[in-house]
Amino acid sequence: NECNFCSNFNKRFRKREPSKIVDEFEHLIDIYKADSIYLVGDNLNLNKKMLLELCNNIITRGLNIKWICVTLEPMSIDREIADKMRHSGCVRATFGFESGSQEMLDSLNKKVSLDKAKKSIEILNRSGIDIVATFILGSPGESEKTLEDTINFIKLSKFKACSASILAPLPGSNIFKKLINKYADYDKLDIIPLYNLQDIYINDFCYVDRIKLENIKNKIADMFRENWDLY
């Protein structure tokens, strides 16, 4: 929640008991004959013990299920986690990498090392878990060079699927606060339509324009247009 683009006001990490999550897996299988489950929980691997317990519960109960997790944190992946996830039926994991440029990751206060992220990608690729990657275009200081770095990072990473969006300075985020500070005489930024708010932000904080960002966004979409099947 310390990323500059995040508008989440809850600074606490909340978790559920893994056994109760797997209880819900069993319910979906028994009642709805589910053969795949989309598990949504930000930074699922932030607590390694919890994630391993989740996987062990699935394995111990003998659940024949494919599952996808959204999202994982790229700094906390190791071989033990990847192998256990795959053994429990995980077939796909989503990461918010945000950028393939260390400069832009630092600009977003993402606290992610690109080198460590690459190692995590290699571990998951070897384990057989497909990776879905999401990116944010238009970080403060975004340039032609940093966009090129992101494209090259995507090309080398063997992602199963990938998408990108243009940064939106949401109320409550640090980037929105920077806009407020710059336009101190204008107190209605929070009621401006998002598209127009993005234009103000891009013009003031990026070295590329919206057209360039939209072109890169579409280019990334075209690279993976055929790969959005569930598994």
Image (spheres, rainbow, N blue to C red):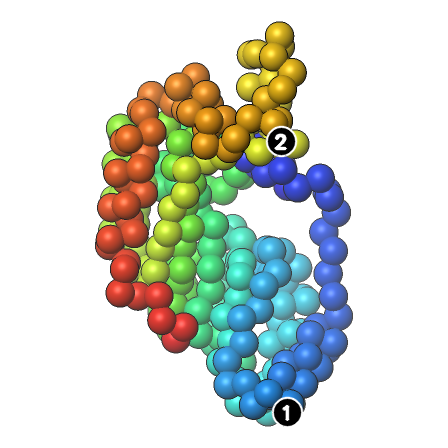
Q: Is 67 situated above or below 202? A: below
Q: Residue at coordinates 60% horizontally, 56% vertically from top-left?
A: 42
Q: Residue at coordinates 65% horizontally, 32% vertically from top-left?
A: 172
Mark 1, secondary structure of its residue: helix
> Residue 57, percent across and down?
66, 81
Q: Residue at coordinates 26% horizontally, 38% vertically from top-left?
A: 215
Q: Which mark is residue 167?
A: none
> Residue 95, percent across and down?
47, 55
User: Alpha-carbon neighbours of circle 2 within 10 Å: few (<14), some, or many (≥20)?
Assistant: some
Q: Quadrant of the N terminus?
A: top right
Mark 2, secondary structure of its residue: loop
User: Alpha-carbon neighbours of circle 1 within 10 Å: few (<14), some, or many (≥20)?
Assistant: few
Is residue 55 among what the camera can see?
yes
Q: Is 117 situated above or below 77? A: above
Query: What's the residue type where badge 2 is placed?
Result: Pro
Foreground residue, 10 or 85? 10
Which residue is under mark 1? 30
Query: What's the residue type where badge 1 is placed?
Result: Asp
Q: Quadrant of the C terminus?
A: bottom left
Q: Residue at coordinates 68% horizontally, 79% vertically from top-left?
A: 24
Q: Is 107 situated above or below 15? A: above
Horizontal side of 18 relative to 55 (left or right) equals right
Which residue is under mark 2? 171
Q: Mark 2–mark 1 contact, CB under 8 Å?
A: no
> In 3D space, how far apart are the residues under numbered discs 2 and 1 (Cα atoms)?
42 Å
Foreground residue, 183 or 83? 183
Mark nearer the N terminus (2 vs 1)? 1
> Residue 78, percent across and down?
50, 62
Q: Is 69 situated above or below 153? A: below
Foreground residue, 227 or 73? 227
Is residue 114 among what the camera can see?
no
> Residue 197, percent across and down?
50, 26
